[in-house]
Image (spheres, rainbow, N blue to C red):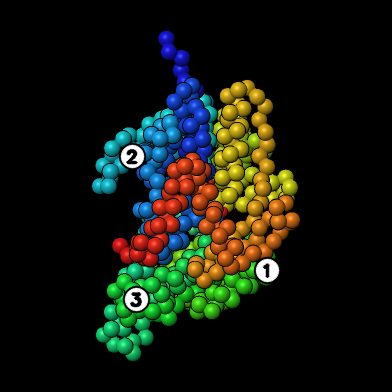
């Protein structure tokens, strides 16, 4: 009788999960253990690129990774599907029915057995219960939403361009309101101006970026709270130079189908409204399989990244709440944290397979960087290498920012292919159009 293989299942092929699947697949996949990645999408795009996809300055088709070809190369199995629930007694996770575009059922609801399970399902935008957000705002949680935003943006640019060619004195504008002055909101806001400036080269001759009217709304006293005050002030001044209206200390109370309404009663009228004011775990995670979650639906984990109530289930990245003993605060929901957690879970799973004691995860904050598109990059680097915390701006900051994505490419493709793709990406920026207009 053939021995049953140990089955390690990873749910979520994002910044952390895909890297883990590659490493486990390369180590075990074709030998002793069965490594399975369950993911609801057919392709992966690194989430920090989504604001560029939304603004049209990045063609996601060129940067996305197809899970099926990736799994073939790295020795894991890929199951297309959406996690619905977990039965911990039977050690099974249940996958929702897979539907065709017309709603007809392709694959019925089914279970997948696991010996070890890793949850890496990321986060969704948190609207903090604000009325009207769900119906009237767009979010940037995945590629489909970023594509939808880009199409709407281009349609409105076309509308204004047409109005200007019919009547050069036309007062038409594309009005965009972005809620949330964190990295996502700031990066999207700046990227919009980069794209708008390029539109005139692609057939919208009468359009220029002055026709873009962008308001960035932040509830706190300043934008980019994760960065030192001086850098946040520099970023705000850069945005204001572009023409962005930055409202701080401004709480949003409601969103309607034509405006963002603030606590002071102001109505920020806008055709495009984006909510980027924080993240939480998806509703599915709320006490999934009887596991402990915090009020934001994030799974509580032990220092080893095993969930508090079940040593066979790990959680990593945005979907877990991991307290950093160095600061006493949760590890922030960032790509660098997901990457470090994936490495830690990989080593702990190897230890588990060899019946060795697991090691606690240690978070190394390497700082944060915010791209203000081609106009500037600001951020701070942390660590021994730079002797504490160092503020950086300009070319060096841009270089480090771009390097983060390059490191992700190497993490999911290995050195050889990763470097090949970096070179191809560089060539693409030279020979391909600056904007994706379809
Ligand atoms: C616009 C934007 C800009 C950002 N910029 C930065 C930045 O500059 N630097 C930085 O460090 N971080 C940045 N972030 C945050 C960063 O993207 C996340 O912290 C990181 O992607 C988290 O990685 P993860 O693996 O936990 O989740 P994700 O990368 O989000 O991956 C989760 C995966 O799980 C899948 N999934 C979800 N639910 C299910 C389900 N039920 N069943 C099956 N599959 C499921 C999803 O499809 C996805 O593929 C940015 C985020 C956004 C939105």
- Residue located 56% across and 40% down the image: 342
- Quadrant position of the C terminus in the picture: bottom left
Contact flag, marks 3 and 2 (Cβ < 8 Å):
no
Asked whether residue 7 appears in the rendered view, the answer is no
Looking at the picture, how far across and down is residue 429, in whole percent?
A: 41, 61
* Number of residues whose C-alpha sits closer than 10 Å to that of mark 1, classed few (under 14), some (14–19) or many (20 or more): few
Q: Nearer the viewer, mark 3 or mark 2?
A: 3
Contact flag, marks 2 and 1 (Cβ < 8 Å):
no
Circle 3 residue: 200
Depicted 95 relative to depicted 129: above or below: above
Depicted 9 relative to depicted 44: above or below: above
Viewed as shown, does residue 148 lie left or right of 317? Answer: left
- Residue located 66% across and 45% down the image: 363
**Label 3 element class:** helix
Task: Indicate which disc, 2 or 1, sits on the residue closer to the N terminus.
Answer: 2
Circle 1 residue: 229
* Number of residues whose C-alpha sits closer than 10 Å to that of mark 2, classed few (under 14), some (14–19) or many (20 or more): some
In three-dimensional space, the C-alpha distance between marks 3 and 2, rounded to whole angstroms, equals 42 Å
Q: Which mark is residue 210?
A: none
The residue positioned farthest toward the top in the image shown: 1
Looking at mark 2, is its residue's CB closer than 8 Å to ligand 1? no
Q: Which mark is residue 98?
A: 2
Looking at the picture, how far across and down is residue 112, in whole percent?
A: 42, 29
- Residue located 53% across and 68% down the image: 372
Task: Indicate which disc, 1 or 3, sits on the residue closer to the N terminus.
Answer: 3
Q: Quadrant of residue 160?
A: bottom left
């Amino acid at each position: 009788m053939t021995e049953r293989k140990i089955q390690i299942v990873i749910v979520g092929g994002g910044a952390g999960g895909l890297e883990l699947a590659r490493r486990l697949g390369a180590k075990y996949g074709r030998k002793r253990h069965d490594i399975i990645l369950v993911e609801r999408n057919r392709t992966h795009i690194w989430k920090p690129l989504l604001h560029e996809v939304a603004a049209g300055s990045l063609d996601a088709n060129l940067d996305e990774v197809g899970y099926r070809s990736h799994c073939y190369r790295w020795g894991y199995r890929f199951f297309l599907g959406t996690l619905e629930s977990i039965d911990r007694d039977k050690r099974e996770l249940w996958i929702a029915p897979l539907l065709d575009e017309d709603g007809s059922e392709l694959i019925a609801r089914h279970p997948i057995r696991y010996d070890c399970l890793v949850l890496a399902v990321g986060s969704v935008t948190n609207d903090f219960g604000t009325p009207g957000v769900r119906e009237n705002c767009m979010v940037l949680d995945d590629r489909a939403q970023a594509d939808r935003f880009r199409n709407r943006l281009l349609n409105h640019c076309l509308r204004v361009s047409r109005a200007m060619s019919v009547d050069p004195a036309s007062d038409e504008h594309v009005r965009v309101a972005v809620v949330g002055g964190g990295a996502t909101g700031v990066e999207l806001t700046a990227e919009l101006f980069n794209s708008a400036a390029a539109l005139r080269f692609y057939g919208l001759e009468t359009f220029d970026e002055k026709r873009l009217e962008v308001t960035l709304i932040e509830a706190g006293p300043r934008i980019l709270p994760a960065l030192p005050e001086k850098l946040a002030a520099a970023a705000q001044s850069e945005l204001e130079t572009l023409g962005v209206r930055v409202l701080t200390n401004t709480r949003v109370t409601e969103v309607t189908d034509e405006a963002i309404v603030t606590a002071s009663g102001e109505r920020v009228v806008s055709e495009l409204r984006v909510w980027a004011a924080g993240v939480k775990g998806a509703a599915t995670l709320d006490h999934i399989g009887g596991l402990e979650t915090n009020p934001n639906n994030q799974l509580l984990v032990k220092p080893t990244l095993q969930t508090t109530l079940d040593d066979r289930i790990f959680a990593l990245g945005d979907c877990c709440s991991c307290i950093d003993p160095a600061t006493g605060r949760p590890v922030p929901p960032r790509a660098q944290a997901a990457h470090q957690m994936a490495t830690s879970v990989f080593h702990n799973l190897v230890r588990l397979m060899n019946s060795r004691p697991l090691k606690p995860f240690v978070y190394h904050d390497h700082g944060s960087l915010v791209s203000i598109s081609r106009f500037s990059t600001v951020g701070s680097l942390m660590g021994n290498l730079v002797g504490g915390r160092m503020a950086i701006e300009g070319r060096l900051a841009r270089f480090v920012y771009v390097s983060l994505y390059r490191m992700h490419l190497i993490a999911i493709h290995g050195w050889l292919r990763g470097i090949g793709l970096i070179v191809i990406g560089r060539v693409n920026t030279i020979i391909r159009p600056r904007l994706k207009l379809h």
